[in-house]
Amino acid sequence: MTQFFQQIINGLSLGSIYALIALGYTMVYGILKLINFAHGEVFMVGAYTGLYAAGALGIDAYEASGRAFPLYLALAVLVAAMAAAALLGVLIEFLAYRPVRTAPRLTPLITAIGVSLFLQNAGMLVFSPNPQRYPAILREVRFELFGVIVTNIKLTIFGVALALMFGLHLLVQKTWTGRAMRALSFNIDAAKLMGIDTNRVIRSTFAIGSALAAAGGILFGLDQITINPLMGVLTGLKAFVAAVLGGIGSIPGAVVGGLLIGLAEQLTAGYLSPAYRDAITFVILIAILLLKPEGLLGVVRVEKV
Amino acid sequence: MRALIRAATIAGVLLVIYLLQLGFESSLNDYVQRIVLLSGINIILAVGLNLINGTTGQFSIGHAGFMAVGAYGAAYLGAKLAPPLHSLLGPGALANGVIFNIALLMGGLFAGISGLIVGMPSLRLRGDYLAVVTLGFGEIIRILFNNASFLGAATGYFGDDPSGLPAYTNFFWVFAWVTAIVVLIHNLTFSQTGRSLIAIREDEIAAEAMATPTTRLKVTAFAISAATAGIAGGLFAHMQAGVRPEDFRFEKSIDMIVMIIVGGLGSISGAILGGIFLAVSLELMRDLQQYRLVLYALLLIVIMIVRPQGLLGSRELHHFLRRRPKSGTVGGA
């Protein structure tokens, strides 16, 4: 039983990272009907920006002297990574996706694959293909709760993810931009006729989604200790499956889907075999496509000619 | 009479390939021979992938997975079939040819069946789910082969013989299969079924309204495409003396996509040109390994923005040569 709760704790913290990334997929898909394959790479770049930002803020000195990295600097690292990723997301949208926005569906999809491939390989050239140790911007404290080992890192991951998701909820439900996003995802042409600057709203969508992915990247680095330029491929794919599981286009769906995928992965690793932890995601994907293709919280939309 | 003409044509084509093979082996060095064989294998991969990605408009980005299934299937069966068939037919080219072709067909069959399994759930829905499912499938299949101990796990499968898989793959067999598959895909594309596939690409809902069985056709086209990738995998395995899981990374799928996009989505001659382009450019860029994929990625993005239909578009090479009016083309844009 203790082991079960241990897996649940690990699954929830991993799942909240997936949820953060899944939000970006679901927001972009909701508006542009585009699987943004480059989103996993934005997550990777976010993690690396965090690594370099921590280096610039003198983490080495703190680690060498054994003092803890101050919290305000850790927050600065988070903000820097989120800002850099937001910029990258906006750039990708502007340079690669906007020119092909009105093209047939396949064209943006191939462009997205191209951007993803470009960032992976440029990442290997710039950051070196070898895994790098992630700086301890948060010092690990372990404590036991009814025999289950909990670390402050796992709790922080869960807390930060929850706070960001709540912020996104407020933004989408309460602000003008959020309302415009919902309008675009409902009907982009009608939104344009109502005088909404669609380019601006799409730009904000990419910025917000990318910033969330970067936060996910830093939390991932904290959790997994090492990062590498290809980390976005599998993690991005799992987050996309999370978005499909929850119902693509649905923001609460992405959160639920992310947590479920994280839990499923940890329970598989714990009770079946760690070799199948990556495979379970795709089993879930195939099952959901067969049984309930609109996802858990998605709505069925009739496609009109 | 028609059957007779057909048999004569086949015999004639095989004879020509055989004569070319004699010239090929005597006049070209190993390095050039390898590029030519790889071009042939690439042509099969590109023409097969083009059927689903180009003609039908559904996007698979995990075809390396099907290639791996075919490669492992053909290698394993080839190794297991060799002793009984050699005792039945005796040693020599005839027995080797029989073993090799049975192994290739079975490899293609396995790949086709995995195509059915992957395609059925994802092709019921809109095409872009297929992209994600195939990507996942490609990774899973590699993980499976990486852990399958009877197939050599991570070191790869090299047959029962210590010297590795027999090098059955030669000019004759590669280009006999290239001819067969190109003719098959060509005839399929220009048949009524092919028109339906193009209709699905152009407008799936309208095609459905015209009583086209869209799901069944998409799944069939996908399975055929997977099977051709499997045959290419079998040829590849018997050229390398063995198969390793890392031969079928995601990069391999990307290579295939680059082939068909450079040539033009939906064009068979474009796919052929793309296959040759990739085999040659891989060799030329050997020293630029780490920049290769960056360049391919940029090439994909730029082509998509500037000329999304690729070099030839969905037209065939002979349409340009004959300068036929545009109405004679398939699909168009």
Image (tube, rainbow, N blue to C red):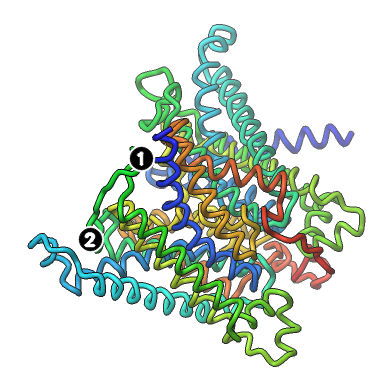
Instruction: Identify whether A136 is placed above or below B112.
Output: below
Residue A134 as seen in the image, left or right of residue A237 = left
Q: Which of the image's four quarters has the C terminus of chain B?
A: bottom right
Count of marks placed on residues = 2
Q: Which of the image's four quarters has the N terminus of chain B?
A: top right
Q: Residue lying farthest left?
A: A65
Q: Give x and y (percent) for residue B65.
A: 54, 42
Q: Give x and y (percent) for residue B24.
A: 48, 41
Which residue is depicted at the point 39% across and 25% down? Answer: B164
Q: Residue lying farthest bottom?
A: A195
Residue B180 as seen in the image, left or right of residue B276 = right
Residue B323 visible? The answer is yes
Q: Amino acid at mark 1?
A: Phe
* Circle on res. B111: none
- Look at mark 2 in the image and give the residue it sits on: A135
Q: Residue lying farthest top?
A: B87
Residue B40 visible? The answer is no
Mark 1 Cα within 10 Å, few/some/many (few <14, many 20+)?
few
* Circle on res. A146: 1
Which residue is depicted at the point 55% across and 57% down? Answer: A240
Q: Amino acid at mark 2?
A: Pro
Which of the pair A208/B47 is nearer the observer?
A: A208
Q: CA distance from mark 1 to mark 2?
A: 30 Å
Which of the pair B151/A25 is nearer the observer?
A: A25
Q: Secondary structure at mark 2?
A: loop
Q: Give x and y (percent) for residue A153.
A: 31, 56
Q: Secondary structure at mark 1?
A: loop
